[in-house]
Image: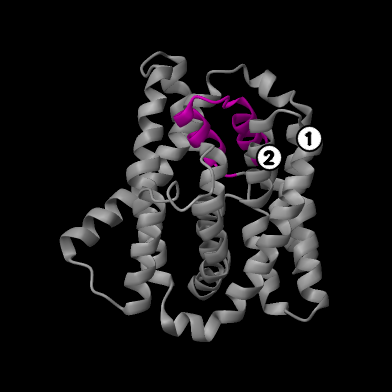
Amino acid sequence: MLFVTTGYILCKTDIVKHEHTKVLSALGVHVFFPATIFNTFSSRLTVPCLKEKGYYILSSAIIIFILACIAKFISKLLTKNKYGQRIYEYTLTNPNYGYVGYPLVSALFGQEMLFNVMIFTLPLSFYSYTYGYSTLTKRPVSFKKLINTVTVSMALGAAVGLLGLPVPYVASSFLSTAASCMGPISMLLAGMVISEFPVASLLKIRNTYIAVAFRLLIIPCTVALVLRIIGLEDLVIPSLMVFSMPCGLNTIIFPRLIGEDCKPGASLSLVSSILCCFTIPLCLQIFS
């Protein structure tokens, strides 16, 4: 939240202009985001991982598919605006598990649980970097359109991870540094975009609270309950620590990149980031 606040103050005091946000968005999408993707897949998508935790990946893929179908239906009920539907669809499927979930899991449960959560989120990463990316950038899902910095970095990362290929130190250092920029840049950008609107107006969007209720409570509790009922108890906490996270920041970054309305994404980010301080402990208390 400190980075979000910093971005907000920088724009409100005119130290940074609102038109600069498009530059940050472009850097995030075409440099820092691909570096993050490559590191994710090259380090986690390995043959031993697939053998040991394959059912984590399969279970998560099934959950994502069902959620995506439900999200598409709910988004059409929330708004008639076509791009607005894309925002809500992405939000209901993709939580901010990277910048909020991972640090929280590490602090609460340790490195072993963090590894389990990272494996569990592989299908979600794949969804976000393919269909989710095309949804928010309004690019049709076709082979030609999917040849971009995002999908190329994902394919290269998967190849490196599965084949066990070494990455030169210079390249590894560059990618690690670039990936570490993604979180701060995203949060700074979120604060800058939020500063464009009166905070009160962001808090008055009724559909935001409906979407956030699904994002923070209904979806994570339903998924965890179903997993417990069918006997996949070891997936309950990983699923909670993914699906109970606040709305992702891509609903701000990508709309800004293509000149679409950022207000719905800013509202979702602001409200969910505030309320998750109460809903995450509640979800953990219910299922602990």
Q: Which residue is mark 1?
A: 78
Residue 98, horizontal then vertical, whole percent? 51, 54
Q: Position of residue 136 (x, y in %)?
A: 55, 39
* Main SS of residues in magenta: helix
What amino acid is found at the position of numbered circle 1 in the picture?
Leu
Residue 18 visible, this angle: yes
Q: Secondary structure at mark 1?
A: helix
- Please tell me whether mark 2 sits on a helix, a strand or a loop: helix
35 or 103: which is nearer to us? 35
Q: Horizontally, is 51 left or right of 20 in the view?
A: right
Kindly identify which numbered label has been placed on residue 88. Answer: 2
Vertical position of residue 168 compared to residue 58: above or below: above
Query: At 73% across and 60% down in the image, what residue appears?
Result: 66
Look at the image and give the residue range highlighted in magenta: 248-272
Where's residue 74, x and y in %?
A: 78, 44
Residue 232, located in which quarter of the rendered image? bottom right
